[in-house]
Image (spheres, coloured by chain):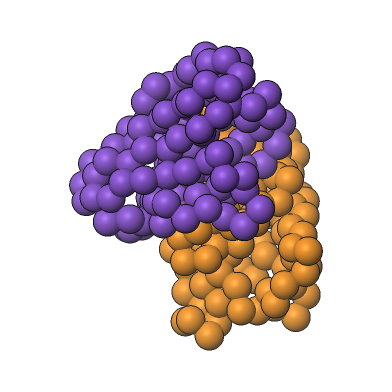
Chain colours: A purple, B orange
Amino acid sequence: DIQMTQSPSSLSASVGDRVTITCQASQDISNYLNWYQQKPGKAPKLLIYDASNLETGVPSRFSGSGSGTDFIFTISSLQPEDIATYYCQQYDNLPYTFGQGTKLEI
Amino acid sequence: EVQLVESGGGLVKPGGSLKLSCAASGFTFSNAWMSWVRQAPGKGLEWVGRFKSKTDGGTTDYAAPVKGRFTISRDDSKNTLYLQMNSLKTEDTAVYYCITDLGGHLDSWGQGTLVTVSS
């Protein structure tokens, strides 16, 4: 299985801050990488697909980049409603695998 | 609007069985690949398995921890996806989500249903 390693596992930031989360795959996954947001008590929501494409309706402060084994998720200006846990997920090979999550706090 | 509503969760003893359902609406269910993902209490996300649309072969794939114990099925006439879970273990305790699977993009998620395996 492809292992996905996210860092940090938790992050405290202030409103307006630029926030960056990294995700590293244990092997080359090209751009087959998605990012999800999960708010407390809710189902996850797809934010970014194919490493850098913003899902329809997702605010432009969210962005993603990378390919191969190293990926970055960025919130350009943190808002209070961005409090959530964020997960990366690869779909290059089955089984789909997720990073362990990054819990974002303000 | 896509809607996915899971049901069938509950408390079951180790070794027991449970069948989850996922009622779908707002899209052409028969054309959709569907996945199940679970989340143990306070833990991360784990993919369980998927069912491709019949037009794409109608095949199933499973994660290793559930292979041979869980079976995903679908009834396209009822727009419903199922997850039959047998030989349940305490480590299967989780919220189970039904999701539209766009070839790896887990696009629309249900609200989840909690399965608790405990004696």
The part of the image, by quadrant, that contains residue B26 is bottom right
Write the residue at 55% across / 39% down.
Answer: A61
- Residue toward you, A78 or B28: A78
The part of the image, by quadrant, that contains residue A100 is top left
Write the residue at 58% across / 22% down.
Answer: A16
From this view, report whether residue A2 is shown above or below residue A6: below
- Image coordinates of residue B98 in percent, x first then y, are 64, 54
Q: Where's the C terminus of chain B, which quadrant?
A: top right
- Residue toward you, A97 or A65: A65
Write the residue at 55% across / 82% down.
Answer: B54
The answer to whether residue B113 is seen in the rendering is: yes
Q: Is residue B110 left or right of residue B50?
A: right
From this view, report whether residue B97 is shown above or below residue A86: below
- Image coordinates of residue A47 in percent, x first then y, are 56, 47
From this view, report whether residue B23 is shown above or below residue A80: below
- Residue toward you, A7 or A98: A7
Q: Residue furthest left?
A: A27
Q: Where's the N terminus of chain B, which quadrant?
A: bottom right
Write the residue at 74% across / 58% down.
Answer: B4
Q: Residue furthest bottom?
A: B55
Q: How many numbered markers are drawn?
A: 0
The answer to whether residue B117 is seen in the rendering is: no
- Image coordinates of residue A58 in percent, x first then y, are 62, 48
